[in-house]
Image: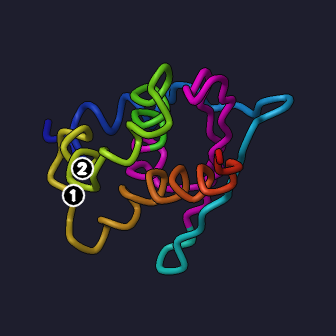
Amino acid sequence: MTLPYGATVLEHFRRPRNQRTLERPTVAREGYNPLCGDRVRIELEIKDAAIVTATFTANACAICTASASLLTERVRGSGVNAVSAISDADVIASLEADIPAGRMLCATLPLRTLREALTELPTRA
């Protein structure tokens, strides 16, 4: 049997990691894809310029949900500045599936939302 999006997407869609809300996130941001209606909210707990906890909630397709699950796993424990090194291509590759061109925004929405959340951090003088 051929899986439509691959085993990794289906695993993280069926059993998403870090799908919950934080009681007191340091920063949070909701992203929306107007093309398909995906919504994802990323919440981060940050201490000493490191992401201690990364969570998400989503009303989204399998690709977006899997991407958020994989991304929150990846950034936990990372320095805030290291997140800027994660590219759209890295996110697509982590899904281990052939993502159609029309669904690329579904896959990259969590990364874009995470980056927007980080803009809420106060800059250090």
Q: Which residue is mark 1?
A: 99
Name the element at disc 1.
loop
Residue 89 in percent (x, y) is at: 20, 53
Q: Are marks 1 and 2 in contact (CB under 8 Å)?
A: yes
Question: How many circles with numbers are drawn on the protein?
Answer: 2
- Measured along the vertical axis of the image, is residue 99 above or below residue 122? below
Q: Residue at x 31, y 45 (%)?
A: 86
Q: Residue at x 62, y 45 (%)?
A: 42
Instruction: Indicate the quadrant containing the N terminus: top left, top right, bottom left or bottom right.
Output: top left
Q: Is residue 44 magenta?
A: yes
Give the mark nearest the N terminus, 1 or 2.
Answer: 2
Q: Magenta stretch? A: 38-67
Relative to 79, does residue 111 appear above or below in the rendering? below
Q: Quadrant of residue 66?
A: top left
Which residue is more in the foreground, 105 or 100?
Answer: 105
Q: Is residue 19 left or right of residue 106?
A: right
Indicate left or right for 53 with 75 as reference: right
The residue to which callout 2 is attached is: 92
Q: Nearer the viewer, residue 4 or 17?
A: 17
Q: Amino acid at mark 2?
A: Ile
Q: Residue 22, how many percent across, how many down?
A: 77, 30
Q: Residue furthest front?
A: 125
